[in-house]
Amino acid sequence: MKIITAIDSMKGSLSSIQANNVIEQVFSSQDISVKKIAIADGGEGTVEAFIENYGGSYQKANVHNLIGEEMQATFGWIEEEKLAIIESADTSGIQFLDGTVATHPSNTNSRGVGETILAALDLGAKKIIVGLGGTATIDGGIGALNALGVEFLDNNHKNIEPFGENLSKIQEVNSANIDQRLNDIELIIASDVTSHLTGTKGAVYMFGTQKGLMKSELDEYEESLKSFQDRVLLGQSTEAGDGAAGGLGFGLRTLLKGKIVSGFSLLVEYSTLIEELNGADLVITGEGKIDDQSLQGKVPVGISRLAKENKIPVIAFVGSVEGNPKSFKKQGLNVVIPIVDKIMSIDQAMKNAKENLTRVAERTKDILFILVDSIN
């Protein structure tokens, strides 16, 4: 029997590699081989998955986080291809949210992403992949772009500080002083969702509250983002993925000529998943939380779609589940199993994620073996 395990990272608790190791330890036996695939969708764990599957090294850069504090960013580097892999969540992620005014989207930006891009350029990068998942900013990418030399001006032609609260004040975008090395690179924007910048499923209405906006603030913030969108697009159309990472996808696509792709599909391209599906009997996947947003391109749904094409059953182990189970089954995700099997706080669940996953995986293995034995 051949099992493929490709579990996305469970934010703040288990990396993709750690979760896959648990499945290998539980299921491997004389009669079962387990093939591990490190996977991600552009969010947390993207750099690690690339390095695990494709080789390369980890690089450091002195940058700033979403509230301007100095920090060291980590990004992936593949020397042979002059390829850098950057996670926007590393510097602008929801792990920095603390419920204070300082981390409210109005007062934060994606500057650290731009600074990490500069570090990659200093290494001689010819291709840069920027993963967009797991961020806390909603600045349309102006923080990152400003770090790269783009200026945002008000109606008096004065520079505007690149924070979310100033989006509606932008009347002019000046790219004259942008770092010229950007003209010679290929920029790939790896998105974990297909949202447009604005609208009911855009950066504000779809993701704003989880990034710190109150429901009463959504309409006003949406109008600010629309104003910025109009200044940049000048009649052009938006694209799927523009709303990822609080509009960072939009900013990088429109002003740096980046190409938005599915983060999950990109990781699959740089892994052996497609080849390993050949001859597989079961696929095990999962993530921290599965819900309706997962249908936009998150790992478990992406995995289940591929497995469905090959008529392979799929089990997903998740920290929590919301949404209609029938929606997931239509995508080929046969069974969704929460790994928390008793009452505990969120902190306890995250702290004990490895133990929880191990326990539920062992129980699932026992059930599968009972069914197999009864059939035989």
Image: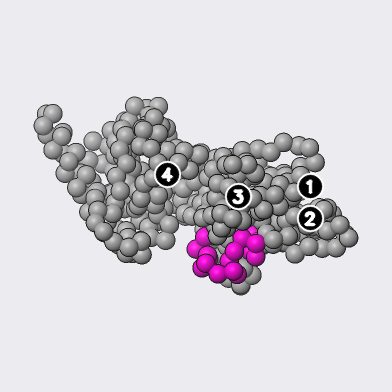
Up-down: is 376 above or below 323? above
Looking at the image, which residue is at 22% across and 44% down? 364
Q: Residues within 10 Å of mark 4 (few under 14, many from 20)?
A: some
Q: Could you tell me how far apart the alpha carbons at marks 1 and 4 are, in whole angstroms?
A: 34 Å
Q: Which residue is mark 3?
A: 204
Q: Position of residue 277 (x, y in %)?
A: 37, 33
Q: Quadrant of the C terminus?
A: top left
Q: Could you tell me how far apart the alpha carbons at marks 3 and 2 are, in whole angstroms?
A: 18 Å
Q: Which residue is mark 1?
A: 231
Tell whether label 2 touches label 1 (CB within 8 Å).
yes
* Amino acid type of the residue that numbered disc 1 sits on in the rendered structure: Arg
For discs 3 and 1, the disc positioned in front in the rendered view: 3
* Amino acid type of the residue that numbered disc 4 sits on in the rendered structure: Asp
State yes or no: residue 97 in magenta: yes
Q: SS for tag 1?
A: helix
Tell whether label 1 touches label 3 (CB within 8 Å).
no
> For residue 170, which numbered disc appears in the image?
2
Q: Could you tell me how far apart the alpha carbons at marks 3 and 1 are, in whole angstroms?
A: 18 Å
